[in-house]
Image: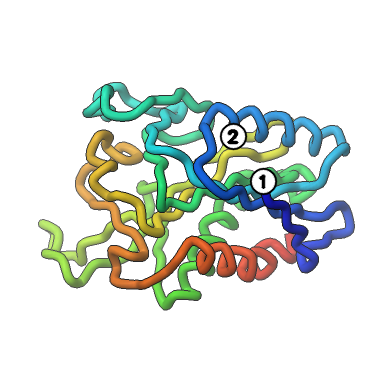
């Protein structure tokens, strides 16, 4: 596990520690780490933390998951998750960003915090000249696809490029964000991602951008203070 301090993220109350783990991290191991770290943050015994990982192929079920949205239950391991949201896929080529931040000290405003997470993803995507969008009634971050057939209503096709799902315990967040860098998009077909069937899924590489995981990490670190610096 490689640990990196984000010197630009120092706040009056705490320091945000950035951890980047190479290789594939077991999901149960990740949950155990997050729960332990979140408890320590709440107790004032540890700094806030952003953890960058990749997982082996798996599906997770959020608190709103519908059994019928798991269309291929024998394909990959399925983990029940107490984060918000429905079914999501994690796998190699996807940057998972686990966000352990003290929302209590950042305003006690969960809706604002989720909006900040969305803004953070959008700001990171802008580093690659990709315009992300938030859509009412559709969780996550979306990109327009003028190269695809228009929707039945005549609008531009849109694909999901990032998912967001968090949990709070004693006002400390965990779980977080997943950004599709270069995952196998066919792996998403075993679920109805986030319960939305009428739109597709894309990645930075699928959009024709030769972006690496390291590039995304740099963009996330650069845009973090831009979004959370005044929290």
Q: Is residue 140 visible?
A: no
Secondary element at image label 1: loop
Residue plotted at (77% across, 68% down): 8
Residue plotted at (73% across, 59% down): 231
Residue neighbourhood size for the residue with mark 1, other residues' Cα within 10 Å, grouped as few (<14), some (14–19), many (≥20): few
x and y, in percent, of residue 156 in the image: 20, 66
Q: Nearer the viewer, mark 1 or mark 2?
A: 1
Report the side of 61 relative to 84 (left or right). Answer: left
Residue plotted at (85% across, 33% down): 43
Q: Which residue is mark 2?
A: 30
x and y, in percent, of residue 223 in the image: 61, 68
Residue 136 or residue 27, whichever sits in front? 27
Q: Is residue 103 above or below residue 119?
A: above
x and y, in percent, of residue 224 in the image: 64, 64
Q: Which residue is mark 1?
A: 1
Residue plotted at (21% across, 62% down): 157
Residue neighbourhood size for the residue with mark 2, other residues' Cα within 10 Å, grouped as few (<14), some (14–19), many (≥20): some
Q: Is residue 70 above or below residue 94?
A: above
Report the side of 154 relative to 184 (left or right). Answer: left
Q: Is residue 45 above or below residue 52?
A: above
Gap in angstroms between the C-alphas marked 1 and 2: 12 Å
User: Residue 180: which disc?
Assistant: none
x and y, in percent, of residue 102 in the image: 75, 44
Whichever of labels 1 and 2 marks the residue nearer the N terminus, that label is: 1
Residue 125 or residue 85, whichever sits in front? 125
Q: Is residue 12 visible?
A: yes
Q: Is residue 194 above or below residue 147?
A: above
Occupied quadrant, residue 38 = top right
């Amino acid at each position: 596990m490689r640990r990196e301090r984000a010197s630009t993220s120092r706040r009056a109350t705490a320091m945000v520690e950035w951890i980047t783990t190479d290789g594939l991290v077991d999901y149960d191991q990740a949950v155990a780490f997050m729960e332990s770290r979140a408890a320590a943050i709440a107790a004032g015994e540890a700094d806030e933390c952003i953890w960058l990982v990749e997982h082996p192929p798996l599906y997770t079920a959020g608190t709103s998951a519908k059994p019928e949205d798991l269309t291929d239950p024998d394909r990959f391991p399925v983990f029940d998750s107490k984060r918000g949201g429905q079914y999501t896929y994690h796998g190699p080529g996807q940057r998972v960003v686990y966000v352990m931040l003290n929302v209590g000290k950042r305003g006690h405003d969960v809706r604002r915090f989720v909006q900040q997470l969305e803004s953070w993803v959008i700001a990171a995507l802008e580093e690659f000249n990709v315009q992300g969008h938030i859509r009412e009634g559709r969780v996550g971050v979306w990109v327009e696809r003028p190269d695809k057939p228009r929707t039945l209503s005549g609008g531009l096709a849109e694909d999901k490029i990032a998912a967001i799902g968090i949990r709070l315990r004693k006002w400390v967040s965990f779980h977080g964000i997943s950004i599709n860098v270069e995952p196998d998009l066919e792996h998403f077909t075993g679920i109805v991602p986030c319960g939305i069937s009428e739109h597709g899924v894309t990645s930075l590489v699928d959009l024709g951008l030769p972006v690496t995981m390291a590039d995304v990490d740099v963009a996330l670190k650069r845009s973090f203070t831009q979004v959370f610096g005044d929290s």
